[in-house]
Amino acid sequence: MRVVLKLGTSVLTAGTDRLHRPRLVDLMRDLAAVRAAGHEAVVVTSGAVLAGWEAVNFPPRDRSLAEKQMLAAVGQGRLMHTYAQLAELYGVTVAQVLLTADDFRNRTRYLNARTTLNACLARGVLPVINENDTVAVDQIKVGDNDTLSAFVANLVEADLLVILTDAPGLFTADPRTHPDATLIEEVARITPETWALAGGAGTHRGTGGMHTKIQAAEIATRAGTPVVIAPGDAPGAFFRIVQGGRLGTRFHAAGTRLEARKRWILAEIASGHLTLDEGAAQAVRERGGSLLPAGIRRVEGVFGRGHTVRLLGPGGDEIARGLSRYSAADLTRIAGRHSRDIERVLGYTYGPEAVHRDDLVLL
Ligand SMILES: Nc1ncnc2c1ncn2[C@@H]1O[C@H](COP(=O)(O)OP(=O)(O)O)[C@@H](O)[C@H]1O
Ligand SMILES: N[C@@H](CCC(=O)OP(=O)(O)O)C(=O)O
């Protein structure tokens, strides 16, 4: 499985007002166990502002944006240093990845981030992601790491998103203010009633409380990824959840990831056409294959890498729609050629397919 683990400030501090090293060791051991069981893990971590606050010697808390960005700039490196040191104990190499809203809106940046994360995972490197707080002002910010973790789960097409926090899961009311509230173990579908359960902004350090966690669950489950919200202080929580154990609150995925992806492809406006030869049309239509550049006769329109294109049969009839792995300009140069020539012609390659099977919907 490919799993995204989100660690909130409340988990990293373990109820104190600084990064709690023993807790971080526990979390790293948990992560290492999941990796050792053969799974791929991606971490979305908070804690940069807190680590900065800790480093500059606890000045009075100032909530201004510039102050927070300054603290994030101080803290992010220190946070990563801690991760790197602890990961090393378990023979794990970490990679820092800082993302912000633009990286999910801009298709080229989106694809590049995805390529980098996939390269990390292919090499067994553990990506540790945070929002790039120093450049992200309000308008261009994801804003909270719960939502960021859902975007990341979509980006890497995760099989599961686990959000660890300081509550044992989603309760019938905020357990801080309602001691009689009870744990909801399963959420089959997020409804207005689900939203109504979220109390205020959470801990004084955390961002968003349960509200942003439900939002994250909605984003991820809609794209086909189930989500578990669970307590960060339960030993080996992440491993137990990944192995299918019951802990916290589980939000069921709405349909499969592939269905969600196909719906999304169909909703996009196509910005070009590829006319295929008979062999390619057959391979795509009848044999469930990808479209290789060799089978493309004509490229029309102006589109970038990752944009939606129509695939036309030799007679001009639309047979499928899909996401192009190459820009129109690149495809024009490699159309009709064997995939092994791509690198020689372009000077680089994004793989042998022009449109990969997973990115293709037959009509
Ligand atoms: N219905 C609810 N069930 C559980 N926790 C809730 C609920 N409503 C609000 N909360 C609050 O959300 C908090 C967790 O959010 P937050 O402080 O932002 O943590 P994190 O740093 O992990 O993102 C809990 O400590 C709890 O007080
Ligand atoms: N990017 C910020 C964390 C923002 C955030 O969402 O925090 P939290 O609610 O604790 O997950 C930081 O590193 O301090």
Image (tube, rainbow, N blue to C red):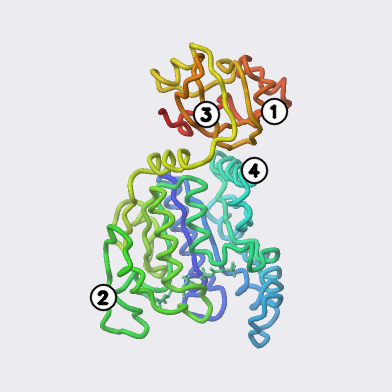
Alpha-carbon span between mark 1 and mark 2: 58 Å
| Crowd around label 1: few <14 · some 14–19 · many ≥20 (10 Å) | some
Circle 1 SS class: helix
Q: Is residue 264 above or below residue 85?
A: above
Where residue 224 appears, x then y in whole percent? 38, 48
Residue depicted at 60% across the width and 46% down the height: 110
Give amino acid for label 2.
Thr
Q: Is residue 207 above or below residue 61?
A: above
Question: Which residue is label 1 attached to?
Answer: 329
Give amino acid for label 4.
Thr
Q: Is mark 4 within 8 Å of ligand 2?
A: no
Give amino acid for label 3.
Arg
- Mark 1 or mark 3, earlier in chain: 3
- Label annotation for residue 108: 4
Circle 4 SS class: helix
Question: Which residue is label 2 attached to?
Answer: 182
Alpha-carbon span between mark 2 and mark 3: 51 Å
